[in-house]
Image (cartoon, rainbow, N blue to C red):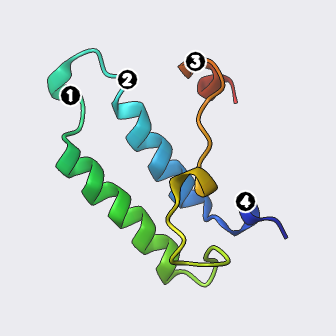
Amino acid sequence: MGKWDLILPKCVVKFLNLALKFCENETDARPSMAEVVRELKSILHMMTDSDNVLANPMDTDVEKVVTTPSSSSTDVAEA
């Protein structure tokens, strides 16, 4: 079982929904940094409270959990 199999799908959905909020044209529609931190903590809490956690639940290195799109935001929409 790879590390991607250990990430809860609902955590991925919440993370992507948060990321997509940054694509809003209106500045006021984008989340504040406080909202981002609160949501990321919520996602991490979901992951560590689950039976289906990462191999090391305290491993919060974002690069190990999430990869960035290769070229543009359309890559995410097509995936």
* Mark positioned earlier in the residue sequence (3 or 1): 1
Task: Assign a secondary structure to mark 3.
Answer: loop
- Mark 2 surroundings within 10 Å by alpha-carbon count, few (fewer than 14), some (14 through 19), many (20 or more): few
Do residues under tags 2 and 3 come within 8 Å of each other at their CB atoms?
Answer: no
Residue visible at 45% across and 72% down? 46
Instruction: Please say if 7 is above or below 15.
Output: below
Give the spatial CA distance, label 2 vs label 1. 9 Å
Left or right, 18 with reference to 38? right
Element on which disc 4 rests = helix
Residue named by callout 4: 4
- State which mark lies toward you, 4 or 1: 4
Q: Earlier in the sequence, mark 4 or mark 1?
A: 4
Name the amino acid type tagged 4. Answer: Trp
Label 3: which residue? Answer: 72
Q: Which label belongs to residue 75?
A: none
Circle 3: residue type = Ser
Location of residue 77 in the rendering, given as x and y in whole percent from the top left corner: 60, 25
In the rendered structure, the answer to whether residue 61 lies left or right of residue 21 reads right
Q: Earlier in the sequence, mark 3 or mark 4?
A: 4
Q: x%, y% of residue 38?
A: 26, 59
